[in-house]
Image (cartoon, grey):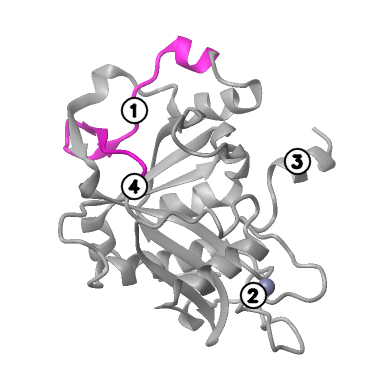
């Protein structure tokens, strides 16, 4: 694979869309220069925090900086919008919302731990070639026999991190911010008492470092979602994409010290 094509499928900064010149979003407006960011290797988690921000701020940030989803199509069923701050400067946004499904089946192993969905050979064969390799790597060893119990849960047991968007170029800030955001969210009144799992969908061609980062922060890749167009909504190009489905038990978020060693 040439370095050019590997850059194309693995953007260096997760869901970061640089702005060209003037940007009027809340991160960049009224500033002489971009907010300071830490170079790779410098520990920075102590300098990251999240706060609720108005929906309009989140919309403006997504419009300018989200790689593939604007702010204008932001769903209204949101719990809260988090601003992501580095050294008290706004650098991005995350939106927590109701999940896009009413029921979801989860699988647990014989120890009661959340586990990926078992897939069959024909499931792998149906994937686009560029995804099949990684899907096999992640899921080929998992079979029906590993499942201790499968449970169908209603949508109100889930909260989705619907957008994760960083408006500056800084390695690992997206995943570190998500860790800070999930801790803040589950402890806040914005998180309904019914919520037992956080869930998020990562575009399959964007996996890169985010998959590894999520895994170390309590998230489990459960499988992939198959692109489909919803008949009752406007056409959105994003629904044509395969996405990895990640979930994280709220219990795990509360138990872990998530922000220990971000660099
Ligand atoms: Zn901006």
Secondary structure found at label 2: loop
Which numbered mark, 1 or 2, is in the foreground of this view? 2
Whether residues under marks 1 and 2 lie with C-beta atoms below 8 angstroms apart, the answer is no
Which numbered mark, 3 or 2, is in the foreground of this view? 2
Q: Earlier in the sequence, mark 4 or mark 2?
A: 2
Toward which corner of the image does residue 23 lie, by quadrant? bottom right
Magenta residues? 99-125
Toward which corner of the image does residue 37 lie, by quadrant? bottom right
- Nearer to me, 85 or 235: 235
Give the image location of residue 191, x and y in percent: 25, 64
Q: Does the residue labelled 3 lie within 8 Å of ligand 1?
A: no
Q: Name the residue under label 1.
A: 117
Q: Earlier in the sequence, mark 1 or mark 2?
A: 2
Q: Name the residue under label 4.
A: 99
Q: How far apart are marks 3 and 4 (CA)?
A: 31 Å
Q: In this view, does 136 lie to the left or right of 31?
A: left
Q: Is mark 1 within 8 Å of ligand 1?
A: no
Q: How far apart are marks 3 and 2 (CA)?
A: 30 Å
Q: Which of marks 1 and 4 is nearer the N terminus?
A: 4
Q: Name the residue under label 3.
A: 6
Q: Does the magenta stretch include residue 111?
A: yes
Q: Mark 2 points at which residue?
A: 25
Q: Does the residue labelled 4 lie within 8 Å of ligand 1?
A: no
Residue found 54% across the figure and 13% down from its top: 125
Secondary structure found at label 1: loop
Give the image location of residue 93, x and y in percent: 51, 68
Q: Earlier in the sequence, mark 3 or mark 2?
A: 3
């Amino acid at each position: 694979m040439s370095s050019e094509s590997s850059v194309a499928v693995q953007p260096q900064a997760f869901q970061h869309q640089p702005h060209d010149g003037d940007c009027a979003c809340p991160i960049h407006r009224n500033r002489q220069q971009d907010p300071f960011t830490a170079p790779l290797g410098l520990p920075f988690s102590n300098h990251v925090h999240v706060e609720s921000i108005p929906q309009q701020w989140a919309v403006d940030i997504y419009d300018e900086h989200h790689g593939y989803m604007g702010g204008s199509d932001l769903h209204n069923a949101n719990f809260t919008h988090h601003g992501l701050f580095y050294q008290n400067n706004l650098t991005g946004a995350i939106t927590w919302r109701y999940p896009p499904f009413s029921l979801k089946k989860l699988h647990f192993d014989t120890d009661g731990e959340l586990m990926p969905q078992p897939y069959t050979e024909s499931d792998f064969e149906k994937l686009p070639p560029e995804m099949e390799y990684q899907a096999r790597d992640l899921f080929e060893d998992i079979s029906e026999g590993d499942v201790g119990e499968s449970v169908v849960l209603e949508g109100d047991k889930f909260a989705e991190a619907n957008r994760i968007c960083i408006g500056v170029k800084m390695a690992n800030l997206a995943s570190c911010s998500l860790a800070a955001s999930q801790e803040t969210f589950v402890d806040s009144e914005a998180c309904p008492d019914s919520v037992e799992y956080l869930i998020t969908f990562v575009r399959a061609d964007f996996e890169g470092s985010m998959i590894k980062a999520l895994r170390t922060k309590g998230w489990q890749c459960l499988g992939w979602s198959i692109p489909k167009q919803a008949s009752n909504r406007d056409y959105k190009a994003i629904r044509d994409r395969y996405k990895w489905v990640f979930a994280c038990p709220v219990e795990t978020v509360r138990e872990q010290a998530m922000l220990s060693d971000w660099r």
